[in-house]
Amino acid sequence: MTSQALIRPAWTPATIALMVLGFMAFWPLGLAMLAYILWGDRLETFRRDVNRGTDRLMSGFRRSTARMNFGAERTGNVAFDDWREAELARLDAERRKLQEASAEFEAYSRELRRAKDQEEFDRFMSERARSRAAGGSVVDG
């Protein structure tokens, strides 16, 4: 999500208008919009955490059912079955590595965004302090 989006979890004219319209039309809609404005930036992290938990649960379920040796899963050829199990284990390890790399990249991206936000805030504060020191009037708001 970019910061240029019209409807984003922030106090923008569009989100305020939608919240007011929501309260006027049906109060739970306005309340939902207010919740989105206040906590919407956490939705992506929440969704990612839920998906990871579900994936972990389902992979554990798949592994436990694979160990039950259902007749349909075995071919009768021991060498092939052993090779297939080894390949599936290798693919599972690769999938885990990819998920870990994805999580590391997401954390890295979050940290970059935080650093950029901090840099912009620091620049604003220094410009504000300079303008006040120069005697310019800055309206607080």
Image (spheres, rainbow, N blue to C red):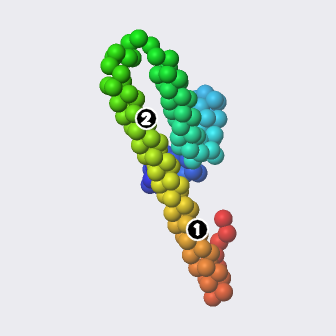
User: Residue at image x 43%, y 46%?
Assistant: 98
Residue at position x 59%, y 45% from top? 42
Residue 78 seen anywhere in this rendered image of the structure: yes
Q: Which mark is residue 89?
A: 2
**Residue at 55% across / 66% down in the picture?**
115
The numbered mark at residue 88 is none
Image position of 80 (left or right of 22): left
Task: Look at the image and tell me whether residue 15 can be seen.
Answer: no
46 lies above or below 58: below
Q: Disc 1 or disc 2, which is closer to the eye?
A: 2
Disc 2 crowd, CA 10 A, few/some/many (<14, 14-19, 20+): few
- On the image, the x and y values in percent for residue 49 come to 57, 40
Residue type (three-letter) at the residue carrying disc 1: Gln
Looking at the picture, does residue 121 appear above or below residue 104? below
- In the picture of the structure, the residue carrying the numbered disc 1 is 118
User: Residue 94: x percent and y percent?
Assistant: 41, 43
Picture coordinates of residue 16, whole percent (x, y): 58, 45
Image quadrant assignment for residue 81: top left
In front of the other: 18 or 46: 46
Give whichever of 114, 6 is nearer the camera: 114
Decide which of 57, 105 is in the foreground and name it: 57
The quadrant in which the C terminus is found is bottom right
Q: Is residue 87 above or below residue 120?
A: above
Q: Give SS at disc 2.
A: helix
